[in-house]
Image: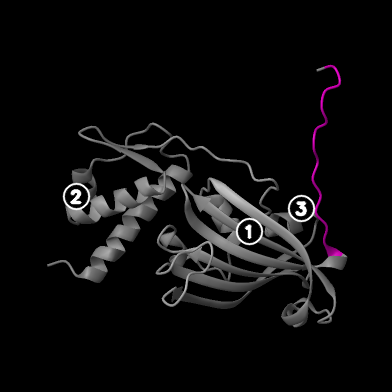
């Protein structure tokens, strides 16, 4: 008899492997992925375990399952956010500074008492708290929650080395994003940013979804004196 924990682990592994091959471009939209019986042999598991993994991928919009024909990589439709999702590490390095990441806290938590927008009650989350530095100076604090039901591979990533945002941008597709930008006092982030509690900060809050299912929620706080948002837009053609 297959242990329940082992079956759960295999389901996550199958989903993660298929997702990685799709995101890396190894399997392109329209490509057929291995049949269920082929995956059963490859992973030495039951059809139920394979079916659960494929159903999860279909629910996330990554594959399409067709009766008798098999499963195929789904066309990827991405809506553009009003502001591009920044990769903090890339932005720091682009400006010629040395990037450093400090992981402050990491734990897995299930929402059992109340929902936490955009996540529903019962969602299993990976919670991360970290600090980004540029040339050893605090650049931003980050508090992030990742939906492990949709991104099980995140539980195995060493986010003390890999920035959460960089990893998600490279490995996890999203179809909808919501950005909220505001001003606030440093307060509890003051010590981590090496500024006073009454110092002005810029706060960026963002939620992302894939096929209507929440993927991640993040709050990043930047010292106002060292950060600005810049966007370039094309003007209308006066000649029509």
Q: Nearer the viewer, residue 58 or 114?
A: 114
Q: Relative to 133, say whether 30 is above or below.
A: above
Residue 231 in magenta?
yes
Q: Position of residue 154 (x, y in %)?
A: 47, 63
Residue bearing the label numbered 2: 41
Q: Which of pointers 1 and 2 indicates the residue nearer the eye?
A: 1
- Stretch in magenta: 226-239
Dot 1 corresponds to which residue? 206
Q: Are marks 2 and 3 in contact (CB under 8 Å)?
A: no
Q: Which residue does the image show at 44% across and 77% down from the upper left?
A: 113
Which residue is at the far front? 114
**Residue placed under numbered mark 3 in the picture:** 94
* Residue under the point 70% across and 48% down: 83
Is residue 109 part of the magenta span, yes or no? no
Is the residue marked by circle 3 packed among few (<14), some (14-19), or many (20+) residues within 10 Å?
A: few
* Quadrant position of residue 221: bottom right
In the displayed orientation, state which residue is furthest to the left: 1
Left or right, residue 151 beside residue 203: left
Q: Residue furthest top?
A: 239
Q: Is the residue under label 2 in contact with that under label 1 (CB below 8 Å)?
A: no
Give whichever of discs 1 and 2 has the lower sequence position.
2
**Residue 48 pos. (x, y %):** 19, 54
Mark positioned earlier in the residue sequence (2 or 3):
2
x, y (%) of residue 39? 24, 48
In what element is the residue under mark 3? Answer: helix
Residue 81 left/right relative to 7: right
Residue 134 visible to an observer of this rendering: no
Residue at the spot 57% in from the left edge and 62% down from the top edge: 217
């Amino acid at each position: 008899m297959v242990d329940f924990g082992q079956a759960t682990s295999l389901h996550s592994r199958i989903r993660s492997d298929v997702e990685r091959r799709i995101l890396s471009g190894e399997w392109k939209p329209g490509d057929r992925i291995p049949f269920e019986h082929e995956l059963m042999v490859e992973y030495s598991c039951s059809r139920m375990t394979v079916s659960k993994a494929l159903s999860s991928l279909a629910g996330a919009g990554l594959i399409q399952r067709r009766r008798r024909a098999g499963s195929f990589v789904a066309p990827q439709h991405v809506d553009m956010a009003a502001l591009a999702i920044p990769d903090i590490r890339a932005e720091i390095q682009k400006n010629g500074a040395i990037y450093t990441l400090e992981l402050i806290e990491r734990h897995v938590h299930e929402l059992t008492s109340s929902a936490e927008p955009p996540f529903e009650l019962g969602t299993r989350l990976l919670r991360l708290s970290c600090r980004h530095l540029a040339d050893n100076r605090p650049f931003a604090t980050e508090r992030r929650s990742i939906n492990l039901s949709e991104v099980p591979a995140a539980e195995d990533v060493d986010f003390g080395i890999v920035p959460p945002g960089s990893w998600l941008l490279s490995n996890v597709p999203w179809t909808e994003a919501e950005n909220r930008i505001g001003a606030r006092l440093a307060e509890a982030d003051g010590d981590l940013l090496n500024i006073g509690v009454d110092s002005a900060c810029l706060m960026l809050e963002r939620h992302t979804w894939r096929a209507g299912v929440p993927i991640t929620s993040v709050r990043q706080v930047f010292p106002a004196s060292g950060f600005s948002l810049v966007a370039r837009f094309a003007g209308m053609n006066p000649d029509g």
